[in-house]
Amino acid sequence: MQAGSPARPDRSLTQRLARVFVVVTLLIVATLVVMGGCFAAVLGHFEPTVSSLIVGRNAVDTVQTGMLDEETGLRGYLNSGDQLYLSAYYAGQAAILAGDSGSVDLATRPDLVRGILAMRVAQQRWLSEWATPALAIERAVTSPTAQRSFLLSGKTLFDTYSVASDAVSTQVDADVTAEQTAEHNVVLIALAVVCAMLMLTVVVARRQHRALRAAVVTPVNDLLTTMRRVGAGDLTAQPAGIGPPELREVAAELGHMTTTLVGERSRMAAAEAEMRSQAARLELIVNVGREISGSLSLRYVAEAVGGAAVRISGFDSARMWIINEDRRELNVVHDTDTDHGRKTAQASLQLGEGLVGRAGQFGRMLATQTIGSLATEYRAGTEISALAVPMIVGARIVGILELISGDPVAVDGSSLDVMHSLAGQAATAVEAARFHQTADELSHTDALTHLPNRRSLELDLDLEVARSLRYNRPIACIMLDVDHFKEVNDRHGHQAGDEILSEFGSAFARSLRETDTAYRYGGEEFCVLLRESDAQDAVVVAERLRIEIANRFAGNRGSPTVTASLGVAAIPSDAIDAKTLIAAADKALYAAKAAGRNCVVRASSTRVVHVRATRGRSRPTSVPPSPVVVTEASTAS
């Protein structure tokens, strides 16, 4: 025992630390496991179940509200004969559809299947036995007695549905309460277990702390006393070197440190100034990186990088050049001189031309001792008047950061490193901004016609229709389809068809105002959005566009003869929202196709079709329930 005792403090301290670490780690892991299990139960079972029940209950309430709207509208219609009451019926019908789809998940719960089934049966019975017949009743030929009997039967059917619906809502509320109670119990049990394990962890840690303190405090106090004396300027102070081997080794190193501290003081003072300067530059780089990393604006990135480059390097001004897509030319995107009212001397350069062009061609940092002199690779400490730092992402040269000074400037190695870092961050940010701009343009533009695509139409239409409804301003829509386009492709080839579609952009430009926008809707179908235009104005524009297309593709240049059919609709005369506006215009377009093509059809609430035929006089003609106003092509056009 005595022979092995000198080594015991070393082993004891190491083993004790290891044991403390293992025990505390196991307790913490066990605590985390319990907490994780609790969170998994709450997030994986209870929360989804409660959310699903609440959504289902809201859907049941929505259906009941829709049923009330339908009943109110139908009763008002039956009592007064005014079809305005049917708007409440149709609104309730939409609410019922939404509510029925939202309550589907409730049918998967065994305790709700019977109630949901009873509610749906009562709902369907009310709809089929009362609501649907109510729409078909002719009030003028129905006796008061029959009408009262019919209304009473509807109330009986609706009350049956209300009872079934209330029963489902009550059961759902009970299920929600049960799930929440179970969730609370699981959380409370988990908290109790976690608290117990944390208490055990505290007890174990405290016991080990006391044991370690007894073995370490005295040697550490000796080391602290020595350090305080050294810190006060007494470099002759030496530690006693007592305690475990680890602390004795620390004491030896402390003694060695005091012997070398005097020599290091002078070197530290010299390095401190450099460190402060470097820290300021690095802080600037970090701030610039933070600013440009979250920006997709090329202008903002260029301004931030240019200003930082001037502050870091000591040059008078900075310019950022970007290499264009064909890799032949560099263009200025920012010049700090413009911030002071001075103009850029040259806005573009050929690759390989001058200092900037050569740096962009070879991808190396180049400098000139005087403005316009021969460009050479820069060596730290040399006085120069201009410096070109390439901005590189991977192996790709994105652009050049050019620094210019009226008086020669010497840049040290650390500043060059910072400039390289700044240029790298700028290159990454510039590429991100350019890719974002390109991707945004491609995602909203049709590649063949260079017109905005259907996605752009949906975004613009929602905004414009909302503005139209908010401020009670008219807005119109034209749906255009190329006539017999399949025959053009079959006879002349798909390339000829693509060439025809690609020319539609210029055809639209000649016929539309600056405030109007044409979109490629899909295939050979186009859509035109007319702001501040009613249906009558839109018909004029559509006819002008039809004539422009017929003249442009009349076949007199060896190209196929192409005409177009157009459908016109407007808000508020023909539609109430974006969806119904497109639907009305599309329906009018199909009417134009049916009317013989190469004509304009307007969606209308009238019951007369006015036709301007190629021969003969125009005369009114009766039409089916969806009347339109049709304008066909004349011989002159």
Image: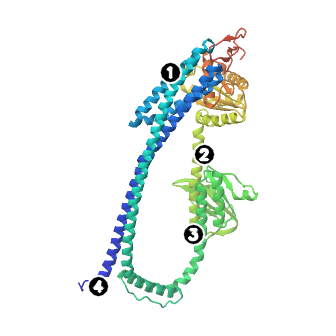
Q: Considering the numbered disc 2 on the image, is that residue within a helix, a strand or a loop?
A: helix
Q: Considering the numbered disc 4 on the image, is that residue within a helix, a strand or a loop?
A: helix
Q: CA distance from mark 2 to mark 1?
A: 55 Å
Residue type (three-letter) at the residue carrying disc 2: Gln
Q: CA distance from mark 4 to mark 2?
A: 73 Å
**Which x, y percent locates residue 438?**
59, 44
> Of circles 4 and 3, which is in front?
4
Residue type (three-letter) at the residue carrying disc 4: Pro
Classed neighbour count for the residue bearing mark 3: other residues with Cα under 10 Å, few (<14), some (14–19), many (≥20):
some
Residue type (three-letter) at the residue carrying disc 1: Ser
Q: Are marks 3 and 1 in contact (CB under 8 Å)?
A: no
- The answer to which of marks 4 and 3 sits earlier in the sequence is 4
Identify the image quadrant of residue 489.
Answer: top right
Q: Which residue is mark 1?
A: 128
- The answer to which of marks 1 and 4 sits earlier in the sequence is 4
- The answer to which of marks 2 and 3 sits earlier in the sequence is 3
> How many numbered badges does the structure rendering display?
4
Classed neighbour count for the residue bearing mark 4: other residues with Cα under 10 Å, few (<14), some (14–19), many (≥20):
few
Asked if residue 84 is positioned above or below residue 195 in the image, the reply reads above
Colour pattern of the rendering: rainbow
**Viewer-side residue, 251 vs 222:** 222
Asked if residue 316 is positioned above or below residue 469 in the image, the reply reads below
Q: CA distance from mark 3 to mark 1?
A: 84 Å
Q: Which residue is mark 2?
A: 437
Q: Considering the numbered disc 3 on the image, is that residue within a helix, a strand or a loop?
A: helix
- Image side of residue 234 versus residue 179, left or right: right
Residue type (three-letter) at the residue carrying disc 3: Ser
Q: Which residue is mark 3?
A: 414
**Which x, y percent locates residue 172?**
46, 39
